[in-house]
Image (cartoon, helix red, strand yellow):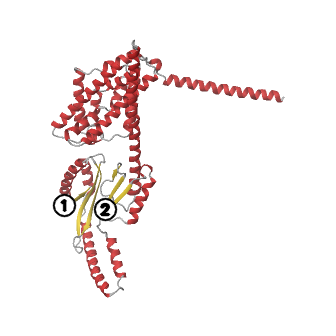
């Protein structure tokens, strides 16, 4: 009986194994059918289509010029819709796909043509954008422009996966126009070139370098995606009759592929590290500074990655204990743990500080006579200061300003403002008479350049002073 039982158990286990194996094979078959696109690939048509998009002359040149003008206008007007429209008609993608394909199939002639045409397209695009921004009277630094001067890890991923989508669509029999257009939007090759031309037009080399860096990232990773897909699909390598020439061409192609791969990997690592550093910095500022109700930032925090420094400026005097805490807390954030924190506060005193000074003065009245005389004078000074402070606070309460409506209007007029604050600061020069000074503190978009912020700050100052009907107004950044 036991033997029969064991046989039945073994049969049951075997049946379960067979069922599991059958299920796994079914899932495997389903996934292969779902994701495998090798059977739907047309090598000859793909290579022919990519080669046809490489040449750059005649109508293609004029299409590029027109698309650069449209993109430049969109960036200048801060219009995302117009920029997307320019991407849809841009012919920049052809030579970049040509570079990736030629490296994958060992076609050195196509590689030469692709690089020559790509260089020509870049030069023409930069020249067109430069002329537009140089001659056009309105050259404000918009958020659309500034968004193309500081690449991060998302730009790398967008370029790579956009390139994958494009080359997969290209290898399919027929054409998937919507995918091609979608990739043209995602990879965004044109706006960086327009921004680089803008940088040249206004003489800002930082803008030019940042925008060209973004364009280079896009171009390298689109070419890399093309190279990888064609290699995985097993596209046939070009064979040369001359064995020496074939060997030399293969070596050249391998070296160029390596030269493309190395900067691609290095760029990815650098941008990835910069993104993590920025995330740690933003988290530190939010948790340790902005969430602390007793701290009020005066302007945007500064981070210098080369010197490994963080500079924080506050309204009000910062106690040594608070400064020490801020310097210690930075060690809890991985990517900025070795940064040195510099804290700066202004010397304006609050009513609490004055009260504490008065209390200390009264407590010290039992000291020597010559000290008492000095303390009594100090007490009179402080009492006068408190009296003036009380009067100014009462006046401030009476003269309220409709800050809510003014703030909304300011956001509409100056779209790059992230935060605006208004207060009345107590100030004294002779340490007897206390004056109330209206003061606004503005935080701008961190991607904007200092020159642009200074210009907008002046415009905002004039407008606020007029709206609030103030004779004097100080603005801090």
Give the image quarter of residue 435. bottom left
- Find numbered disc 1 in the image and state the secondary structure of the residue it sits on: loop
- Give the answer, above or below, for where 182 lies relative to 384: above
Label 1 sits on residue: 470
Give the image quarter of residue 252. top left
Image coords of residue 388 (percent x, y) = 25, 73
Q: Are marks 1 and 2 in contact (CB under 8 Å)?
A: no
Q: Farthest residue to the right: give it.
A: 1
| Along the line of sight, the residue nearer the viewer: 464 or 338 | 338
Tell me the crowding category of disc 2: few under 14, some 14 to 19, or many 20 or more residues within 10 angstroms, Cα based: some
Q: Residue at x 33, y 65 (%)?
A: 317
Image coords of residue 162 (percent x, y) = 38, 30
Image coords of residue 467 (percent x, y) = 19, 56
| On-image quarter of the C terminus | bottom left
Image coords of residue 415 (percent x, y) = 26, 46
- Give the answer, above or below, for where 311 lies relative to 79: below
| On-image quarter of the N terminus | top right
Query: Going by the image, does 101 lie left or right of 124?
Result: right
Query: Going by the image, does 375 lie left or right of 457?
Result: right
Tell me the crowding category of disc 1: few under 14, some 14 to 19, or many 20 or more residues within 10 angstroms, Cα based: few
Looking at the rendered structure, which numbered label has been put on residue 266? none
Label 2 sits on residue: 315
- The residues bearing labels 1 and 2 have C-alpha atoms spaced at a distance of 22 Å
Q: Residue at x 79, y 29 (%)?
A: 6
């Amino acid at each position: 009986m036991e033997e029969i039982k064991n046989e039945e158990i073994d049969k049951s286990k075997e049946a379960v194994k067979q069922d599991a194996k059958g299920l796994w094979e079914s899932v495997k078959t389903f996934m292969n059918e779902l994701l495998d696109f090798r059977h739907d690939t047309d090598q000859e048509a793909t290579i022919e289509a990519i080669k046809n998009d490489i040449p750059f002359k005649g109508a293609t040149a004029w299409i590029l010029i027109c698309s650069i003008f449209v993109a430049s206008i969109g960036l200048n007007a801060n219009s995302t819709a117009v920029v997307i429209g320019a991407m849809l008609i841009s012919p920049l993608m052809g030579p970049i796909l040509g570079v990736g394909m030629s490296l994958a199939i060992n076609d050195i002639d196509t590689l030469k043509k692709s690089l020559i045409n790509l260089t020509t397209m870049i030069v023409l695009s930069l020249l067109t954008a430069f002329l537009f921004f140089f001659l056009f009277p309105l050259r404000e630094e918009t958020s659309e422009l500034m968004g193309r001067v500081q690449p991060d890890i998302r730009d790398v991923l967008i370029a790579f996966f956009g390139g994958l989508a494009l080359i997969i669509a290209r290898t399919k029999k027929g054409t998937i126009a919507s995918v091609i257009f979608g990739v043209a939007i995602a990879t965004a090759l044109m706006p960086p070139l327009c921004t680089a031309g803008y940088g040249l037009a206004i003489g800002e080399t930082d803008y030019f370098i940042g925008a060209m860096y973004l364009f280079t990232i896009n171009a390298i990773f689109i070419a890399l995606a093309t190279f990888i897909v064609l290699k995985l699909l097993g596209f046939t390598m070009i064979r040369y009759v001359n064995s020496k020439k074939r060997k030399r061409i293969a070596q050249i192609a391998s070296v160029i592929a390596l030269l493309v791969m190395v900067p691609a990997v290095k760029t990815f690592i650098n941008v990835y590290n910069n993104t993590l550093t920025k995330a740690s910095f933003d988290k530190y500022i939010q948790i340790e500074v902005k969430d602390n109700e007793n701290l009020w930032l005066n302007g945007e925090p500064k981070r210098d990655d080369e010197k490994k420094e963080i500079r924080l400026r506050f309204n009000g005097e910062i106690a040594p204990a608070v400064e020490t805490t801020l310097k210690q807390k930075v060690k809890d954030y991985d990517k900025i743990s070795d940064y040195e924190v510099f804290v700066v506060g202004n010397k304006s005193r609050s009513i609490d500080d004055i009260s504490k000074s008065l209390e200390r003065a009264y407590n010290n009245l039992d000291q020597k006579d010559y000290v008492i005389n000095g303390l009594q004078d100090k007490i009179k000074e402080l009492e006068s200061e408190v009296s003036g402070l009380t009067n100014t606070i009462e006046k401030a309460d009476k003269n309220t300003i409709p800050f809510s409506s003014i703030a909304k209007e300011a956001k509409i007029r100056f779209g790059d403002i992230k935060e605006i604050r208004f207060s009345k600061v107590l100030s004294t020069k002779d340490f007897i008479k206390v004056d109330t000074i209206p003061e606004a503190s503005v935080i701008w978009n961190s991607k904007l350049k200092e020159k642009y912020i200074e210009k907008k700050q002046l415009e905002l100052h004039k407008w606020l002073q007029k709206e609030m009907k103030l004779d004097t107004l100080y603005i801090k950044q």
